[in-house]
Image (cartoon, rainbow, N blue to C red):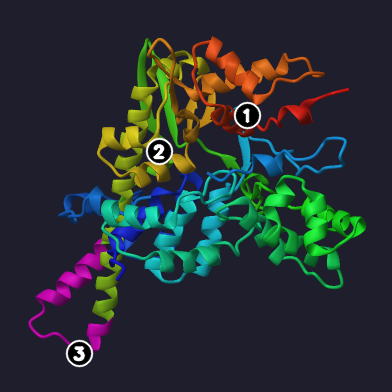
Amino acid sequence: MLQKLSPQQIQFIKLLQLNTQDFEEKLEQELLDNPALEDQKNGEEERFEDAPEEEFSDEDYLKDDVDINELLNAGGDDEGGFHLNEDYSNEEQRDSPLASQSTFQEYLMEQARATFFNDADLLLAIHLINSIEEDGYLRRELRSIVNDLAFNENIQTTEDHLERLLIKIQNFDPAGIGARDLQECLLLQLYKKDYGDNPALTLAETIISEQMEAFSKKHYDKIKRSLKIDDDQLKSAIAEIVKLNPKPGETGVSTGKTQYIVPDFTVNNTDGVLEVSLNSRNAPDLRISAAYSETLKAYENAPVKAQSLRDAVQYIKQKLDGAKWFIDSVKQRQNTLMSTMEAIVQRQREFFADGDETKLKPMILKDIANQVGLDISTISRVANSKYVETTFGIFPLKFFFSEGIVNDDGEEVSNREIKKILSNAIEAENKKKPLTDEALMDLLKEKGYNIARRTVAKYREQLNIPVARLRKEL
């Protein structure tokens, strides 16, 4: 059975993942929905901060390789192969003001909230969505996610239950989202198409479902023999397949709502002292309505309690409890945001001092989680959609997280440095004889970085750089 989460836990989780603008909208809505909650702007009435706090700790809050190279890079040779469109951009805008569409994960969250009405299922769905990588794939095994929920969050579920939730998520937009591998990703997109009188789509589905290995290796003769089709039929099916998106998470999904990014944090450098501040819009001065509190006290102190007032008093009590939980969750959110940002600044002090990207140190979510004593998924929610303003630009918090590589001198450096070397080497290469992944691996080894060829391929893909044969110019 799934563990039942308290209203406070659910409230905190939902608030934590909101950026400044979304938090303001949520606050305004809460003030409208709950008359027992007030924004402290007028009067000197008793504030809730003087009342006893509910006891619930951070520990109670729910936290938060597919080999596709052959297919993504197939084609471009004299054999009339194909390649899938790779014209996607990961460029982060840093100038202020920044205009941004709702982020990819926010878009999925919106769909999840409209799909899952059971709080427990919604939280599991959010955990699955948080596990989806930037390209749109869910590469973690469901068994691992089940174990993570059990050991780290004390929530019991099963692979079958997560599978049922994932199937619903895979029906979200963009098509192909939440796939475990490229084959599933392409099939999910084909399933959403209206085949009508188009036999090429039916054949495309057959090829991907039954002949994926041969297709990815461009063994077209084998496909024609196995499916008993001719060249024209195969070309028509391939024409449909190449329209599909191998990386559905990198489509620049737009929900039609353009927002200007409001930094959630500011880091100022005053004579070498780094000062972190939270955008004041995240710290409203909330209080409990004195009128509601007094009404409840008057009823409780009354010697005779009229039956006719009980329903009204029950309503007041529910609103007061809701207001207390909300204020508690807001305070917990503020503390979590500040402790996380301060830990990031502490670890990346050299970067925040002068903005030199080469001074970024390797840092993963677990590093910050261990430092502040919170759960990894809690840190993930903070980093997911928050921004920090510095004297040299505005950066998403995700910008500061990267894996580490140990060089020949035993020093751990950020993989950003490796990517920069790869990018510069490919930019300067002879386009008539571009560098293969193996050649790039050797180049890195000469510079003291001993990494495997498949790791070079992974970093090259993350830079949206195609394989050597597709970079070749006549």
Neighbour tally class for label 1: few under 14, some 14-19, many 20 plus, Cα within 10 Å: some
Q: Looking at the rendering, which quadrant does residue 121 occupy?
A: bottom left
Q: Which of marks 1 and 3 is in front?
A: 1
The residue that mark 3 highlights is 307
- Given residues 132 and 23, the one toward you in this image is 132
Q: What numbered label is drawn on residue 280?
A: 2
Q: Does the magenta stretch include residue 303?
A: yes
Q: Would residue 400 be seen by someone viewing this image from the given angle?
A: yes
Separation of residues labelled 2 and 1 (CA atoms): 40 Å
Is 435 drawn above or below residue 144 in the view shown?
above
Vertical comparison of 86 with 326: above or below: above
Give the SS element for disc 3. Answer: helix
Amino acid type, label 3: Gln
**Amino acid type, callout 1:** Arg
Residue under the point 58% across and 52% down: 181
Q: Position of residue 421 (x, y in %)?
A: 59, 16
Q: What residue type is labelled 2?
A: Ser
Q: Is mark 1 on a helix, strand or loop?
A: helix
Residue 58 placed where, x, y %?
Answer: 25, 48
Q: Which of 396 and 460 is in front in this view?
A: 460
| Secondary element at image label 2 | helix
Q: What stretch is highlighted in magenta?
A: 290-311
User: Which residue, given by chain and number where applicable, does mark 1 sit on?
Assistant: 460
Depth check: give the residue in front, 122 or 47: 122
Q: Are marks 2 and 1 in contact (CB under 8 Å)?
A: no
Place of residue 320 in the rendered image (x, y in percent of width and height, measured from the top left): 26, 66
Circle 3: is it few (<14), some (14-19), or many (20+) Cα within 10 Å? few
Mark 2 residue crowding within 10 angstroms, few (<14) / some (14–19) / many (20+)? few
Which residue is most to the right? 232
